[in-house]
């Protein structure tokens, strides 16, 4: 929905603001545990989820342009008619393989393959960090409830600041490609700090730095959104989140295997799993640096004005060679 209504240069910041809402949840959740018992926390959570469902059904407007929605309906009707010519076994196989067909968009070109790799690394490491950091801090540094509440509060507040405030000016200053490079460099650093930590202070320093790694995924989402046409916005975001979900399931499994093999060894011992995670982030840095500038940065969408009234966007390249532009007399492409 955000991709349908936001111009390209604002998409990374918009996705960031969306994720800032999750950070707000991280900041407030420890407070609920202090003032409510388990039953009332569950009841409050159910009420919030139900309220979100009602708002989505009753108040969320349709963002897909009418002509694109009409084309999508015609395409679905054509697919249903085509099913009538297939056998039951062919229909069954087609339904079973549909997820793979939808995910195939991630393999469209070099840019998408690199971005998919980055999303995978991001989901894998982020999920593993969130799963094991608390247990690691409790076991090795004797974190108590107060320390954990402070850690969650820091993650939430800093996440809101980074996603809601900092990501847009940083993006305008250095471009999406370097934002991702910086995010994964900081991811390498904070996981290295976790792995080599010798006190609680080091863990909190790592938490502060880790907040800036949250710039990676909304920026990756924005770049992919900028490189597909309007009818593919939902498909690309769905495929990207599916890949991240798969990585989020795999990350804890891999780091747990590393932990199992190193927990009884000499320093850094169990911290080795975070050092391994920092190596994954370092590989992601190389992938991010390899992103083509002309496709990754939204600076190719240059905002100008026409008689100080109407705003247009000048586009250097249209993704996927789609015929979405006309040539002006001076050679610029006007969307």
Image (cartoon, rainbow, N blue to C red):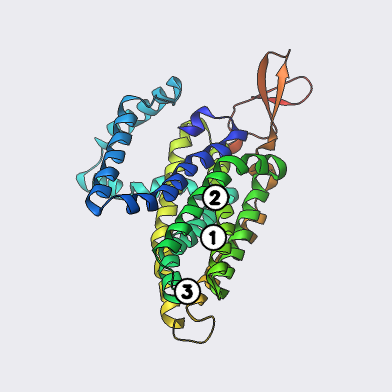
Residue 239: % across, % down: 43, 46
What residue is rendered at 33% in x and 30% in y? 55
The one of 140 and 188 positioned closer to us in this rendering: 140
Pick out the residue farthest to the left.
88
Q: Nearer the viewer, mark 3 or mark 1?
A: 3
Residue 145: % across, % down: 39, 63
Contact flag, marks 2 and 1 (Cβ < 8 Å): yes
Mark 3 residue crowding within 10 angstroms, few (<14) / some (14–19) / many (20+): some
- The quadrant in which the C terminus is found is top right
- The quadrant in which the N terminus is found is top left
User: What's the CA distance linking mark 2 and mark 3?
Assistant: 23 Å
How many marks the image carries: the answer is 3
Badge number at residue 158: 2
User: What's the CA distance linking mark 3 and mark 1?
Assistant: 15 Å
The one of 156 and 327 positioned closer to us in this rendering: 156
Badge number at residue 207: 1
Contact flag, marks 2 and 3 (Cβ < 8 Å): no
Q: Which residue is mark 3?
A: 141
Whether residue 228 sits left or right of residue 27 in the image: it is right
User: What's the CA distance linking mark 2 and mark 1?
Assistant: 9 Å
Q: Earlier in the sequence, mark 2 or mark 1?
A: 2
């Amino acid at each position: 929905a955000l991709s349908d209504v936001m111009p390209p240069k604002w998409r990374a910041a918009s996705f960031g603001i969306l994720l800032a809402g999750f950070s707000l949840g991280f900041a407030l959740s420890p407070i609920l545990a202090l003032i409510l018992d388990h039953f009332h926390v569950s009841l409050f959570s159910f009420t919030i989820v139900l309220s979100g469902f009602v708002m989505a059904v009753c108040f969320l407007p349709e963002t897909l342009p009418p002509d694109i929605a009409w084309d999508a309906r015609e395409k679905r009707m054509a697919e249903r008619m085509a099913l009538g010519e297939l056998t039951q076994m062919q229909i069954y196989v087609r339904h079973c393989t549909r997820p793979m067909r939808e995910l195939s968009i991630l393999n469209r070109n070099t840019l998408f393959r690199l971005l998919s790799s980055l999303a995978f690394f991001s989901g894998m490491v982020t999920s593993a960090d969130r799963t094991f950091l608390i247990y690691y801090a409790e076991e090795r540094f004797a974190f108590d409830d107060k320390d954990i509440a402070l850690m969650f509060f820091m993650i939430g507040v800093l996440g809101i600041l980074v996603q809601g405030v900092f990501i847009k000016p940083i993006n305008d200053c250095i471009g999406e490609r370097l934002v991702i490079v910086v995010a994964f460099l900081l991811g390498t650093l904070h996981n290295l700090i976790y792995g080599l930590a010798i006190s609680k202070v080091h863990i909190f320093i790592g938490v502060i730095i880790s907040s800036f790694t949250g710039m990676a995924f909304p920026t990756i989402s924005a770049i992919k959104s900028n490189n597909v046409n309007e009818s593919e916005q939902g498909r690309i975001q769905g495929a990207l989140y599916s890949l991240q979900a798969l990585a989020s399931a795999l990350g804890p499994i891999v780091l747990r295997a590393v932990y199992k093999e190193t927990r009884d060894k000499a320093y850094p011992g169990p911290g080795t799993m975070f050092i391994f995670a920092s190596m994954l982030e370092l590989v992601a840095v190389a992938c991010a640096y390899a992103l083509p500038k002309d496709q990754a940065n939204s600076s190719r969408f240059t905002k100008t004005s026409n008689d100080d009234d109407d705003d247009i966007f000048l586009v250097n390249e249209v993704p996927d060679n789609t015929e979405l532009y006309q040539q002006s007399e001076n050679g610029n492409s006007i969307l």
